[in-house]
């Protein structure tokens, strides 16, 4: 019979190691834990990545950088010879091939090496399959076990309940439990809900979905449309400012500030300074 009650000490051997899985961006410095050193002092230690075996909700409206960020993470890990499984519900696999090849080029990664470490589960063109979580999880189980993958991405989880948002929590819970059982680290990419403010975790995945996963990372964007915004953001009218914020994490502490999200012309993603500091600098510059 499966055990459901534990004395806390019994879990010592089951608890995963606490360390970071690198994304290759400044996000790696934004998660931390507290530990005791040999002298008994309590020390704050930066994880150096997203928490190991965490399943994070990556939330944002279109063109905020969700897929670019997740794909860059996947390529960075694949370049370190880790195996990755990507479930695509939106872009057919044959188009992902060209996209990943180009991403590898601009990131300076070896595509031949990367192509042997990334496995695609494609349900984007099968409407019937996308409504069957059980069948999809069987495909993912096969891909993970065959490849030996330790990292999984779902782009997007919203695509599995886009016509029935009432099923959102049920679908997310099944995928979360499955990925946990397979000891995966990864992202569930969620699309913004129109009825919600884009900067909140409720903006995607149905009410309460953010409470299922281990943490949420919210991406947002703003079109600069006034002279005042031009001044405080330091960019010309018509430009887009993108931001990123960690909105809670059960497995580690984290920075709580909103940061600038930088995406260059080649689509390379990184995280800049805090938004508040960015605005302060531009205000001071405008007063000179």
Image (cartoon, rainbow, N blue to C red):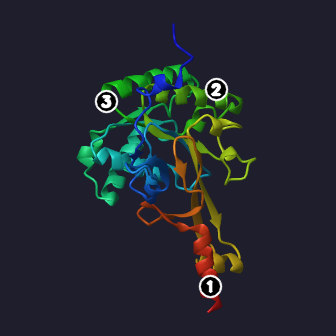
Whether tag 1 and tag 3 are in contact, CB under 8 A, the answer is: no
Dot 2 alpha-carbon crowd within 10 angstroms: few under 14, some 14 to 19, many 20 or more: some
Residue at screen point 71% across, 30% down: 166
Residue 39 visible within the image: yes
Q: Residue sitting at 64 percent across and 26 percent down? A: 170
Query: Mark 1 or mark 3, which has the lower sequence index?
Result: 3
Q: Nearer the viewer, mark 1 or mark 3?
A: 1
Q: Please say if 142 is above or below 226.
A: above
What residue is shown at x 51% (from left), y 28% (from top)? 126
Q: Nearer the viewer, residue 4 or 50?
A: 4
Picture coordinates of residue 66, whole percent (x, y): 52, 51
Name the side, left or right, on which 153 lies relative to 149: right
Q: Residues within 10 Å of mark 3 (few under 14, many from 20)?
A: some
Residue found at the very far top of the displayed protein: 1
Residue 37, image x and y in percent?
A: 40, 49
Q: Is residue 271 above or below residue 36?
A: below
**Helix, strand, or loop for circle 3?**
helix
Q: CA distance from mark 3 to mark 2?
A: 27 Å
Could you say where residue 189 lies in the image, as x and y percent from the top left? 54, 43
Name the residue furthest bottom. Answer: 288
Q: Nearer the viewer, residue 281 or 135?
A: 281
Q: Which mark is residue 147?
A: 3
Mark on residue 284? 1
Which residue corresponds to mark 2? 170
Q: Position of residue 195 (x, y in %)?
A: 75, 47
Q: In this orientation, which residue lies closer to the viewer: 264 or 13?
A: 13
């Amino acid at each position: 019979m499966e055990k459901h009650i534990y004395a806390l000490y019994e879990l010592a051997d089951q608890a995963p190691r606490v360390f970071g899985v690198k994304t290759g961006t400044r996000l790696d410095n934004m998660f931390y834990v507290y530990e005791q050193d040999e002298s008994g002092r309590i020390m704050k230690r930066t994880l150096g990545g997203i928490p190991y075996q965490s399943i994070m909700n990556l939330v944002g409206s279109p063109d905020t950088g969700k897929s670019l960020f997740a794909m860059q993470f996947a390529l960075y890990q694949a370049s370190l010879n880790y195996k990755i499984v990507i479930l695509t519900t939106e872009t057919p696999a044959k188009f992902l091939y060209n996209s990943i090849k180009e991403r590898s080029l601009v990131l300076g990664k070896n595509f031949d090496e990367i192509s042997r470490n990334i496995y695609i589960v494609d349900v984007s063109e099968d409407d019937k399959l996308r409504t069957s979580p059980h069948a999809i999880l069987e495909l993912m189980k096969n891909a993970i076990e065959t490849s030996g993958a330790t990292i999984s991405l779902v782009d997007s989880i919203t695509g599995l309940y886009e016509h029935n948002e009432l099923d959102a929590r049920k679908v997310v819970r099944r995928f979360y439990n499955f990925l946990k059982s397979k000891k995966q680290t990864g992202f569930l990419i969620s699309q913004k809900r129109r009825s919600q403010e884009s900067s909140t975790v409720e903006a995607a995945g149905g009410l309460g979905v953010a409470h299922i996963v281990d943490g949420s990372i919210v991406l947002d964007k703003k079109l600069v449309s006034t002279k005042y915004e031009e001044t405080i953001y330091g960019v010309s009218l018509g430009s887009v400012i993108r931001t990123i914020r960690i909105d809670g994490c059960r497995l580690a502490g984290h920075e709580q500030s909103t940061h600038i999200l930088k995406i260059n012309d080649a689509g390379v993603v990184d995280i800049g300074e805090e938004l508040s500091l960015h605005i302060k600098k531009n205000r001071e510059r405008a007063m000179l």
